[in-house]
Image (cartoon, rainbow, N blue to C red):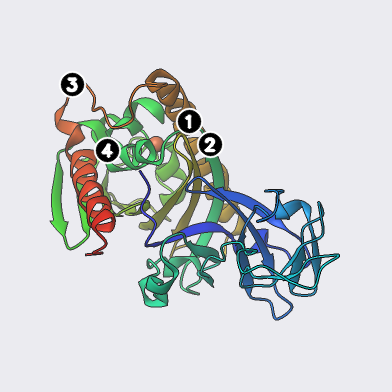
């Protein structure tokens, strides 16, 4: 169900505040995050080895974490270093410590074999922290399996129906897509030539509904939950004051449980950087757009219900090509991980 030998986003860096315990469930496991005194993030299993009390209900004492049920104290490696009322600490008195690091304003966690964690494998979302870009970011908790979120982003034809108020337009559903697999990634490209811009792009490019633009969506998917979409419009008419729009929609999806997901997102732009109103417009409109996805995804998950999760759907349409390639790649990587050979 979950890929674990990979880096996944656990939180925005700002969510893990010095001196505080931050609990979050990742891939079914309860994890507690905190900052050591040197500022580095620590991630421990949120379950005391003794009676399974959540350590996130405990107390941070320097770099150590005390369970506030019976007082067992753990170090940053998850090793119990003190048990009140006895000198001996059994070797089994320990909780998992997960490899964790901060990059691009995110906290990334490695839920798999700790000895395989390789800091060079963090997926590239440099747009989050590159001074040439400004990111408008947000988070949605979605009560749906992470693969449904992947499917949503690998088939953008849904924009026409779900997002008519912002980014949806007939040209999105009608334009063909080109798909290719390269390495451990799926690429889905859609070009919408000489079309009218939807409201979202009218504002960003400073054009009107009747002006013509070339619009594009170039999506890259890396399992289990990394999707970055190069999006934008180029105005075709000589509209005074209009501008080209170049954006990256950054979608980082981390499973919470089999039927719920953490959805970290951002819209990074490299135009009109000095306009806070554009930053705010993007944050608000992308959030509203993803609220619409959340409504649909949660309703879809309710309909899937207790159905066996591996069972496919009954009807395939042409627009499924992206999701289908995504499923295949994810399945092959899950299989490779189960065999112990990460490809
Ligand atoms: Fe959507």
Which residue has dot 4 on it? 155
Callout 4 secondary element: loop
Name the spot of residue 224 as percent of width and height, x first.
34, 52
> Real-space Cα distance between discs 4 and 3?
15 Å
Mark 3 vs mark 1: which is more N-terminal? 1
Name the spot of residue 329 as percent of width and height, x first.
21, 50
| Depth check, front residue: 174 or 52 | 52
Q: Is mark 2 within 8 Å of ligand 1?
A: no
The quadrant in which the N terminus is found is top left
> Real-space Cα distance between discs 2 and 1?
7 Å
- Mark 4 against mark 2, which lies toward the viewer? 4
Ligand 1, image quadrant it occupies: top left
Which residue has dot 2 on it? 288
> Real-space Cα distance between discs 4 and 2?
19 Å
Residue at left 38%, top 48%? 2
Callout 3 secondary element: loop
Q: Is mark 4 within 8 Å of ligand 1?
A: no
Mark 4 Cα shell of 10 Å, populated few (<14), some (14-19), many (≥20): some
Please report contact status of discs 2 and 1: CB closer than 8 Å, yes or no. yes
Which residue has dot 3 on it? 315
| Depth check, front residue: 223 or 238 | 223
Mark 4 vs mark 3: which is more N-terminal? 4
């Amino acid at each position: 169900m979950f890929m674990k030998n990979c880096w996944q986003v656990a939180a925005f860096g700002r969510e893990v505040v010095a001196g505080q315990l931050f609990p979050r469930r990742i891939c079914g496991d309860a994890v507690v995050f905190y900052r050591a005194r040197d500022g580095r993030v620590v991630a421990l299993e949120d379950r005391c080895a003794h009676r399974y009390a959540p350590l996130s209900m405990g107390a941070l004492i320097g770099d150590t974490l005390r369970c506030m049920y019976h007082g067992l104290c753990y170090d940053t490696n998850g090793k119990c270093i003190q048990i009140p009322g006895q000198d001996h600490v059994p070797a089994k008195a320990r909780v998992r410590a997960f490899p964790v690091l901060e990059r691009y304003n995110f906290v990334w966690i490695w839920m798999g074999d700790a000895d395989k964690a390789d800091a060079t494998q963090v997926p590239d979302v440099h747009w989050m922290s590159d001074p040439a870009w400004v990111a408008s970011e947000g988070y949605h908790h979605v009560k749906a399996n992470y693969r449904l979120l992947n499917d949503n982003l690998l088939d953008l034809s849904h924009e026409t129906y779900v997002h008519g108020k912002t980014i949806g337009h007939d040209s999105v559903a009608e334009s063909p897509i080109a798909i290719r697999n390269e390495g451990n990634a799926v690429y889905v490209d859609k070009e919408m030539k000489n079309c009218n811009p939807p409201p979202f792009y009218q504002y960003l490019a400073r054009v009107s509904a009747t002006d013509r633009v070339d619009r594009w969506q170039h999506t890259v998917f890396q399992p289990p939950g990394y999707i970055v979409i190069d999006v934008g419009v180029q105005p075709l008419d000589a509209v005074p004051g209009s501008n080209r729009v170049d954006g990256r929609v950054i979608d980082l999806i981390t499973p919470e449980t089999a039927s719920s997901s953490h959805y970290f997102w951002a819209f990074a732009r490299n135009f009109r950087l000095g306009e806070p109103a554009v930053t705010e417009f993007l944050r608000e409109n992308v959030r509203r757009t993803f609220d619409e996805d959340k409504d649909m995804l949660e309703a879809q998950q309710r309909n899937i219900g207790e159905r066996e999760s591996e069972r496919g759907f009954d009807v395939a349409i042409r627009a499924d090509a992206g999701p289908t390639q995504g499923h295949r790649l994810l399945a092959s990587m899950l299989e490779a991980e189960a065999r112990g050979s990460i490809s």
